[in-house]
């Protein structure tokens, strides 16, 4: 393997390292996680509100039940007074009858209100159930996202950990001079020390190269740099 080819491989490993480090940041994960967390918070708030309203409805229901049993007792008592024969005074009997009628009317109203309220409670309960289900789904989503993220991070770190060894294996085959040149250019050219030669021009700066340079790059084992951008030229056969 030629020196330039080895240096090119070294550069690819350095690029891979940069990419993996970028992947490790995973800004996408952070924004997705925040989005779901906000949704969960909204759902929690909605559930809390609905539950408070449900508690109020149930309180109303208790009051209605209380009124209903009081009216039932009154009804029973008036009926007893009417039919027990204790009173035979027609005026008094009329008064009792009137009270009984009013009590029965009121009881019917309460029964209607109770039915309405039962419907409202049912609706509220089903709304809470739906919201709770949605919240649970979102929580599962969040857990899955976190697990997936952890798995990916682990994979990336494992890949990153392999790179120094892979670089060492390449460096062993290179002269210290070549490594020095590479490192210097790596810093100078922002991580692009080696440029491919393609169709007679340097891919590092897109300049067409003179024929003698092209020949040297292709056939000698010397390190040839581009006259224009100074990068090490690599010809891939
Ligand atoms: Zn160049």
Image (cartoon, rainbow, N blue to C red):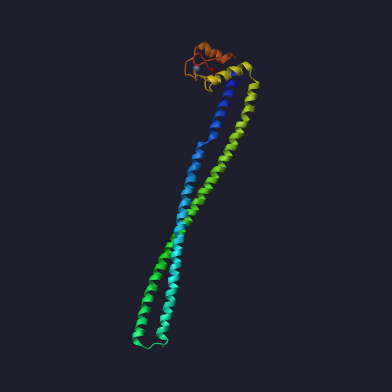
In which image quadrant can residue 183 be found?
Answer: top right
Residue 63 visible? The answer is yes
The quadrant in which the C terminus is found is: top right
Q: Left of 162 or right of it: where is 87?
A: left
Instruction: Return the residue nearer the eye: 10 or 222.
Output: 10
In which image quadrant can residue 2 be found?
Answer: top right
In which image quadrant can residue 233 be found?
Answer: top right
Instruction: Return the residue nearer the eye: 203 or 211.
Output: 203
Q: Residue furthest top?
A: 212
Q: Is residue 100 above or below residue 128?
A: below
- At x 40%, y 65%, the residue is 116
Q: Is residue 235 above or below residue 51?
A: above
- At x 62%, y 25%, the residue is 167
- At x 50%, y 45%, the residue is 37
The quadrant in which the N terminus is found is: top right
- Residue 159 in the image: state x and y as whole percent: 60, 32
- Residue 203 in the image: state x and y as whole percent: 50, 20
Q: Is residue 68 above or below residue 46?
A: below
Q: Left of 119 or right of it: where is 150?
A: right
Residue 235 visible? The answer is no
Instruction: Please give the count of numbered marks on the rendered protein.
Output: 0
Q: In this view, does 63 lie above or below 104?
A: above
- Residue 13 in the image: state x and y as whole percent: 58, 26
Instruction: Return the residue nearer the eye: 64 or 13.
Output: 64
- Residue 66 in the image: state x and y as whole percent: 45, 70
């Amino acid at each position: 393997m030629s020196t330039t080819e080895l240096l090119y491989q070294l550069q690819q490993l350095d690029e891979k390292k940069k990419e993996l480090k970028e992947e490790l940041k995973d800004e996408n994960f952070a924004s997705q996680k925040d989005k779901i967390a906000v949704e969960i918070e909204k759902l929690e708030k909605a559930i809390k509100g609905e539950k408070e309203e449900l508690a109020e409805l149930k309180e109303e229901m208790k009051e209605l039940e209380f009124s209903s049993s009081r009216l039932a007792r009154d009804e029973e008592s008036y009926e007893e007074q009417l039919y027990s024969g204790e009173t035979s005074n027609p005026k008094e009997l009329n008064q009792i009858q009137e009270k009984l009628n009013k009590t029965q009317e009121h009881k019917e109203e309460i029964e209607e209100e109770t039915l309405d309220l039962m419907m409202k409670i049912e609706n509220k309960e089903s709304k809470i159930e739906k919201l709770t289900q949605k919240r649970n789904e979102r929580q599962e989503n969040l857990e899955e996202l976190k697990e997936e993220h952890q798995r990916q991070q682990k994979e990336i770190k494992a890949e990153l950990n392999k790179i120094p060894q892979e670089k060492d294996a390449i460096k062993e085959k290179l002269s210290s001079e070549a490594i020095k040149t590479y490192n210097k250019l790596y810093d100078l050219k922002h991580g692009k020390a080696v440029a491919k030669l393609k169709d007679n021009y340097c891919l590092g700066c897109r300049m067409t190269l003179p024929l003698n340079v092209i020949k040297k790059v292709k056939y000698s084992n010397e390190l040839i740099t581009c006259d224009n951008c100074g990068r090490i030229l690599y010809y891939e056969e």
